[in-house]
Amino acid sequence: MGMQEVGKLIDKWINDKKFRELIRKDPKNAVQNSEIKLTKEEWDLLSHVDWTLSDEELKSRINKGM
């Protein structure tokens, strides 16, 4: 799992507009309803993402390593 799953999450977020909309509304359910399996530490990191940022701002943070 680990970074491979985080990579899947990022890839899905970048390429799937519907997933982006879902994760903004309810990150936990969006991920749980996907095939992505995160560790507790990854869930903790995900819970600190500011989903109110624009797509461009989030992409910039992803490119910088959050």
Image: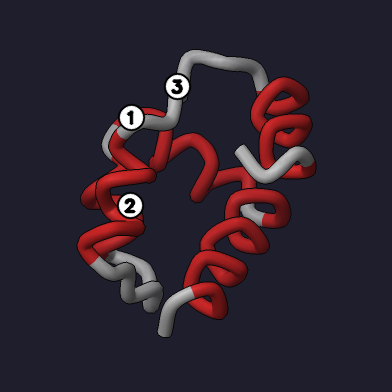
Q: Is residue 14 left or right of residue 43?
A: right
Q: Are marks 1 and 3 in contact (CB under 8 Å)?
A: no
Give x and y (percent) for residue 16: 63, 54
Element type at mark 2? helix
From the image, state whether disc 2 or disc 3 is nearer to you: 3
Tell me, for residue 25, which label it has, or none. Answer: 1
Q: Could you tell me which residue is drawn at 60 percent across and 61 percent down?
A: 12
Give x and y (percent) for residue 32: 25, 63
User: Which of the two labelled residues, at mark 2 and mark 1, occupies the earlier sequence position?
Assistant: 1
Q: Amino acid at mark 1?
A: Lys
Disc 2/disc 3 C-alpha distance (Å): 15 Å
Q: Are marks 2 and 1 in contact (CB under 8 Å)?
A: yes
The N terminus lies in which quarter of the figure? bottom left
Q: What colour scheme was applied to this rendering of the protein? A: secondary structure
Disc 1/disc 3 C-alpha distance (Å): 11 Å
Q: Amino acid at mark 2?
A: Ala
Label 3, residues with CA under 10 Å away: few <14, some 14-19, many ≥20? few
Q: Is residue 48 above or below residue 43?
A: above
Q: Quadrant of residue 48?
A: top left
Element type at mark 1? helix
Q: Amino acid at mark 3?
A: Asp
Q: Could you tell me which residue is drawn at 78 percent across and 43 percent down?
A: 63
The C terminus lies in which quarter of the figure? top right
Q: Is residue 29 above or below residue 1?
A: above
**Residue at the spot of label 3:** 50
User: Which of the two labelled residues, at mark 2 and mark 3, occupies the earlier sequence position?
Assistant: 2
Q: Is residue 2 left or right of residue 30?
A: right
